[in-house]
């Protein structure tokens, strides 16, 4: 997990005490946010523990974390976002215009490859694969992106790694 997301997780904790509690209960208390980035297995450990301490199922925690993080990511990469896009154009082009740029510009960042297809003017299918299995985080990003564009969308997941599929399919439909 790159520190860009790690720092957002620290902000999402809401207080230094809570953040330290998450780290220590996940056995990561020696981690300095600005020094070390957690490995994927440490990140999973931390996310699981944070969800547990927040009394939320992991998928709900990750979705809320996505909703929280999206406005910051969008603000940070706004110069790569075409002003004429709507939310579905944004999702269709996230991989080519944003995640690809993130990999080029930010050392150590490796966002997942998103394979998006525009099924028709009101539907985008996003295929996602990652060992972190953070599809609820992706759904939260989609929900917050729709709010950013003041548009309404519905999401469903015909396929999901958390249900044993080889990849996730996130279908986003204009509501
Ligand atoms: C302005 C828009 C966006 C920016 C700047 C952005 C950037 C990033 C960055 C920096 C990471 C961390 C990479 C790492 O840990 O090495 C990340 C992770 C992730 N991104 Fe994006 N992202 C954006 C939009 C989206 C959208 C729209 C989706 C999906 C619909 C998405 C899906 C994900 C997921 C699921 C992860 C978690 C890591 C994983 O599953 O492996 N992102 N993104």
Image (cartoon, rainbow, N blue to C red):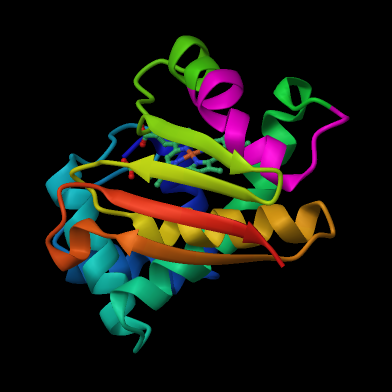
Q: Nearer the viewer, residue 120 or 78?
A: 120
- Quarter of the rendering occupied by the N terminus: top left
The residue closer to the viewer here, 153 or 14, is 153
Picture mark count: 0
Furthest-top residue in view? 104
Identify which residue is drawn at 33% across, 54% down.
134
Question: Residue 132: image x %, image y %?
Answer: 23, 48
Q: Is residue 96 left or right of residue 136?
A: right
Given residues 51 and 150, the one toward you in this image is 150
Above or below — where is 163 with respect to 168?
below
Q: Quadrant of residue 142?
A: bottom right
| Residues shaded magenta | 83-99
Locate residue 127: give its quadrant: top left
User: Within the magenta stretch, is there residue 97?
Assistant: yes
In this view, which residue lies farthest toward the front?
Answer: 120
- Residue 111 inside the magenta-drawn segment: no
Quick one: quadrant of the C terminus?
A: bottom right
Q: Main secondary structure of the magenta part?
A: helix
Tell me if I can see residue 29 in this picture.
no
| Coordinates of residue 66 in the picture (x, y in percent) | 51, 58
Going by the image, does 153 lie left or right of 37? right
């Amino acid at each position: 997990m790159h520190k860009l997301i790690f720092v957002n997780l620290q902000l999402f904790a809401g207080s230094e005490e809570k953040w330290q509690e998450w780290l220590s209960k996940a056995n990561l208390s020696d981690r300095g946010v600005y020094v070390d980035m957690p490995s994927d297995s440490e990140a999973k450990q931390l996310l699981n523990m944070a969800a547990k301490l927040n009394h939320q199922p992991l998928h709900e925690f990750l979705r809320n974390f996505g909703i929280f993080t999206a406005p910051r990511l969008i603000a940070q990469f706004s110069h790569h976002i075409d002003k004429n896009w709507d939310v579905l154009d944004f999702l269709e082009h996230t991989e080519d215009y944003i995640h690809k740029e993130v990999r080029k510009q930010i050392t150590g960042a490796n966002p997942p490859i998103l394979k998006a297809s525009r099924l028709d003017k009101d539907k985008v299918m996003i295929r996602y694969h990652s060992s972190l299995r953070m599809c609820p985080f992706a759904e939260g990003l989609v929900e917050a992106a729709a709010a950013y564009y003041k548009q309404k969308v519905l999401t469903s997941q015909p396929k999901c790694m958390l249900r044993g599929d080889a990849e996730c399919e996130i279908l986003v439909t204009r509501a």
